[in-house]
Image (cartoon, helix red, strand yellow):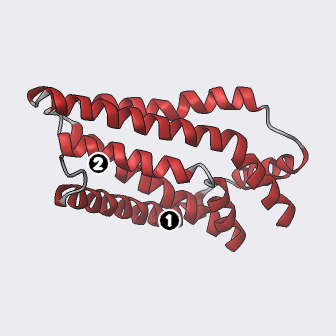
């Protein structure tokens, strides 16, 4: 029986996590440098939306379809990019961009609202991040490992790739369900406490 976890997986995950951290540091730096040049409208809009969240419920069906389209677009892009010669580049670029967005969002939250902004940023990503992060990390790790040479490998490797992509998409779908139905509860609870 084939061993699932080996040194290659550890090295690839370590390298991709390093790319995420580099992107996060760049995003935090960007957030700190761009903060003085932001428009005040963004602050007012955030406060307005946060207050509306306290008062109303979100139309979950339309929100679910919106999230389904937005989130699955990324999974589909990376799954198809994994079949091309740009597989490693897309995996590294994806981790850098995700780290950049996390760093920029987190630093802007802290700069605008202090500790409450950091907590709100974390709450806005909970509980869906519990499924999004591992499924995307697994997908990008598999893409990096295969390096677009899936066509030259055995049929078993193609089945393994398709199964991994399918499992990652299921993880993404679970994240969408958590974001649609669980996250508004977390945010409304936070709105009451803050």
Q: In which quarter of the image is residue 6?
A: bottom left
Question: What residue is rendered at 79% in x and 47% in y?
Answer: 49
Tell me, for residue 33, which label it has, or none: 1
Residue 82: x, y in percent? 26, 34
Q: In this view, does 39 lie above or below 72?
A: below
Disc nearer the start of the sequence (1/2) = 1
Q: Pinpoint residue 22: horizontal percent, then vertical percent.
A: 34, 63
Crowding near the residue tagged with mark 1, few <14, some 14–19, many ≥20 C-alpha atoms within 10 Å: few
Residue at the spot 49% in from the left edge and 61% down from the top edge: 103
Q: How far from the left and from the top, in percent, is residue 81?
A: 28, 32
Q: Mark 2 points at which residue?
A: 141
Q: In this view, does 133 lie above or below 169?
A: below
Above or below 95: residue 194: below
Kindly give the residue lying farthest to the right in the view shown.
Answer: 55
Tell me if 73 is positioned left or right of 1 in this view: right
Instruction: Report the residue at 27% width, 63% height from top.
Output: 14
Q: Distance between the residues labelled 1 and 2?
A: 32 Å
Of the 4 image quadrants, the one containing the C terminus is bottom right
Extreme-left residue of the structure: 152
What residue is shown at x 11% (from left), y 29% (from top)? 154
């Amino acid at each position: 029986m084939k061993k699932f976890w080996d040194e290659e997986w550890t090295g690839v995950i370590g390298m991709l996590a390093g790319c995420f951290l580099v992107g996060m540091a760049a995003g935090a730096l960007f957030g700190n440098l761009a903060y003085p040049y932001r428009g005040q409208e963004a602050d007012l809009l955030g406060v307005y939306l946060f207050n509306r969240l306290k008062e109303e419920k979100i139309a979950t069906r339309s929100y679910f379809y919106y999230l389904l389209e937005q989130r699955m677009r990324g999974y589909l892009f990376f799954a198809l990019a994994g079949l091309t010669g740009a597989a490693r580049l897309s995996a590294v670029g994806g981790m850098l961009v995700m780290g950049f967005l996390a760093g920029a969002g987190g630093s802007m939250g802290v700069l605008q609202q202090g500790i409450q902004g950091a907590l709100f940023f974390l709450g806005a990503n909970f509980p869906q991040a519990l499924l999004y992060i591992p499924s995307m990390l697994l997908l990008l790790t598999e893409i990096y490992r295969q390096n677009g040479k899936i066509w030259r490998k055995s049929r078993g490797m193609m089945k393994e790739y398709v199964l991994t992509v399918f499992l990652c998409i299921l993880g993404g779908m679970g994240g969408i369900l958590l974001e649609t139905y669980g996250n508004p509860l977390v945010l409304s609870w936070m709105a009451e406490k803050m």
